[in-house]
Image (tube, coloured by chain):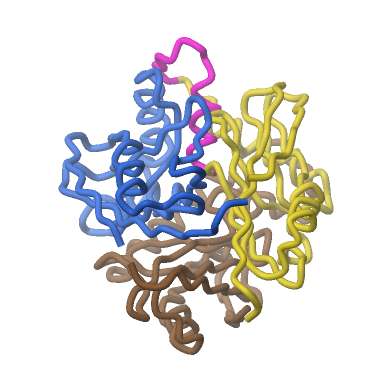
Chain colours: A brown, B blue, C yellow
Amino acid sequence: VETIQIRTHGKVEFLDITEQVQASVSRAALRDGLVCVWAPHTTAGVIVNENADPDVCHDLRLLMREMSERDLPLRHAEGNSPAHFLSSLTGPSITILVEEGRLCLGTWQGVFFAEYDGPRTRQCWLKMLDTGSG
Amino acid sequence: VETIQIRTHGKVEFLDITEQVQASVSRAALRDGLVCVWAPHTTAGVIVNENADPDVCHDLRLLMREMSERDLPLRHAEGNSPAHFLSSLTGPSITILVEEGRLCLGTWQGVFFAEYDGPRTRQCWLKMLDTGSG
Amino acid sequence: VETIQIRTHGKVEFLDITEQVQASVSRAALRDGLVCVWAPHTTAGVIVNENADPDVCHDLRLLMREMSERDLPLRHAEGNSPAHFLSSLTGPSITILVEEGRLCLGTWQGVFFAEYDGPRTRQCWLKMLDTGSG
């Protein structure tokens, strides 16, 4: 398992880790297969979204907070239940296709680490699957 | 990688692509393993839901729009941030079990392309993993 | 495919199935690879979240119900569209890394069966992928 180290700076933040995932795939010399990117945290996750206009991440933050910060009789003493909720919704991992050594992403797609309870020191674990060509 | 071509007609729409995914698995002669279905778009995704009563998709559309179309100071100039948000939430892909050449789905489960910013011409990419029997 | 049998008791409930998934991986003698855990239901799913403080699951229930039980002109005659909605959002499956025969989970992570329309008798299907070491 390869590990990516991540440092987040905001409460809710989306960090583009596409290049770090691609670098891990290249280091592992994976030509054709899948790479599973896993965030070992319960108040964070991995998502895919647009990496061209930073305003998309700004708007995602607003929409995620609107959805999760509700006036409800929550009990969890740490006070970060909205972060646990967002983590469960977006999920801990993404499995990405790899061909000819490159991540198969759409034109506007990037892989993002999703921080829901930062700032913190985080990591992602990566597992490669070789399927051979075809 | 196999490609499925998709044409959507509504703003938010769920298209049943189960038969197209099964046809790709059959064409690839995959007997036992997994198939990863990836939508290379940032305002769409792939979901699994009931394929029996079309009212389920109607209600999903209402609930998804209610969740994403909020009165917030959004910045993304294209105006489709709700679609990016839904795409990040449901995710770009689904990984489905395959046994004896057939997708392993529950009685009521279908695989749907989720359009959040249509109508558009879209596609899905499919990668097969052979695990052998067992 | 291995099968896990599940009995839920609440309307919306999160059941920790980490030990059952680990037991299946051990039974299959999988050392290094991935295990895909699939819920063959359209009103349930599989999520990952904290397994230390039960208040986290309590708060997840409140936040999930708040998000899905909205005053909208829903049509599905069974009346469980909020459950279909939550099932589509969290997804039917989780793919987990395995190393040296153990699930690779973060310190606080557990695997949970997510019931959105219980109580019911449910199951999960598991597929193992051997990647070899590395």
Q: Residue C26, relative to residue B121: is it above or below?
A: below
Q: Is residue A109 magenta?
A: no
Residue at (39% x, 47% y) in the render: B86
Q: Which part of the image, by quadrant, shows the N terminus of chain A?
A: bottom right
Give the total number of marks visible in the rendering.
0
Residue at (20% x, 34% y) in the render: B10
Determine whether, in the image, residue C93 is placed left or right of residue B53.
right
From where the camera sits, is residue C46 visible?
yes
The quarter of the displayed image where residue C129 is located: bottom right
Q: Nearer the viewer, residue B59 or B6?
A: B6
Residue C94 on image: x %, y %:
59, 52
Determine whether, in the image, residue C67 is placed left or right of residue B63.
right
Residue at (40% x, 14% y) in the render: C75
Residue reaching furthest to the top:
C77
Residue A28 on image: x %, y %:
51, 85
Magenta range is: C72-90
Q: Residue C39, relative to residue A120: is it above or below?
A: above
Q: Is residue C78 magenta?
A: yes
